[in-house]
Amino acid sequence: MIKRTLFFSNAVCLTLKNKQLVIQNKETRAESSVPIEDVGFIIVENNQVYISIPVINALAENNAAVVFCNEKHLPFSMNLPLDCNTIQNQLFAAQIESTLPIKKKCWKQIIEQKIKNQAEVLEKYKIDSIKLKQYASEIKSGDSTNREAMAAKLYWDLLIDVDWIRTRHGEYPNNLLNYGYAILRAATARALIGSGLLPTLGIHHHNKYDAYALADDIMEPYRPYIDDEVVEFMKNGDSSEELTTNFKRKILDILTRDVEIGNVTRPLMVALTITSSSLAKVFTDKAETLTLPEFAK
């Protein structure tokens, strides 16, 4: 079942009654409700939102992620369950004991598919992708020749046809991309935890300040879906360079966008779970390859 994403930009009270999330507008006192089991994500943008402890616990029990935004309305922190898989201890041990060759093999697959998906994005916009596909075919174990960085530079130069540099804190449209990646990161962390894995222990990312290193690894081949949404938004004539409510809604809708994965079509939110589950199988020697998304135009 596709889980719902709820976005709160107004002051509301969130409480629990009969396994229903009760949403009350603080100003009008109007109420509505949603079954807790139907919720996959909650984005809290307004700092006047009240959320009760029973709601937080019920959401965690159903593996729903709660993302809190900062004063700039950007995703900043996240609440996720600590125990939502029946063999979590076994999977934690397998993940921790995973060998370097296995991690390098996984990273090779991830980057190869990421670059292939980037090439598909270029083709969607009638841009030559031959060089990018060549980079994808040259990936070695652990991406030792750093084809990811080479492909990224070419990709952004071709996709964003302006004097622009892709950076974490740079100028527009970096702000749009960063917002999209933050939502994708939260969705990836949720999928990993649901599969019984620690999102903190990465297979490639390993910065000591990175609390979601594995999520940053696994989301890589999914990034082109965010890129595509941002480019579409820009090309459709939206003149605002700010993070508008309309843009945020478009990004949240991407969680239900169709993704080709394992010879089937699934919503992106479900595809992330398939990828995370395949990683757990690799860690426990039940599979040799990851199941990764193929960009669907």
Image: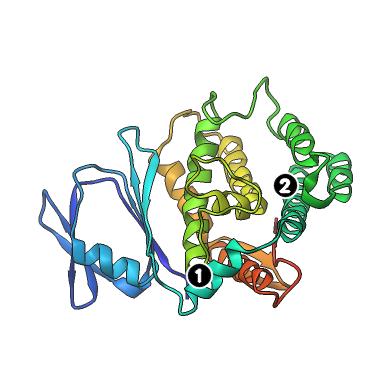
Taking the spot 77% from the left edge, 49% from the top edge, the residue there is 142
Residue 65, x across and y down, in percent:
39, 59
Q: Position of residue 280 (x, y in %)?
A: 61, 70
Earlier in the chain: of badge 2 and badge 1, it is 2
Q: Nearer the viewer, mark 2 or mark 1?
A: 1
Extreme top residue here?
163
Quarter placement of the C terminus: bottom right
Q: Residues within 10 Å of mark 1 (few under 14, many from 20)?
A: many
Residue 22 horizontal side relative to residue 109, left or right: left
Quadrant in the picture for residue 163: top right
Mark 2 closeness class: few <14, some 14–19, many ≥20 residues within 10 Å: many
Tag 2: amino acid: Val
Which residue is label 1 attached to?
196
Q: Which of 64 and 146 is in front in this view?
A: 146
Residue identifier under label 2: 121
Q: What residue type is labelled 1?
A: Gly
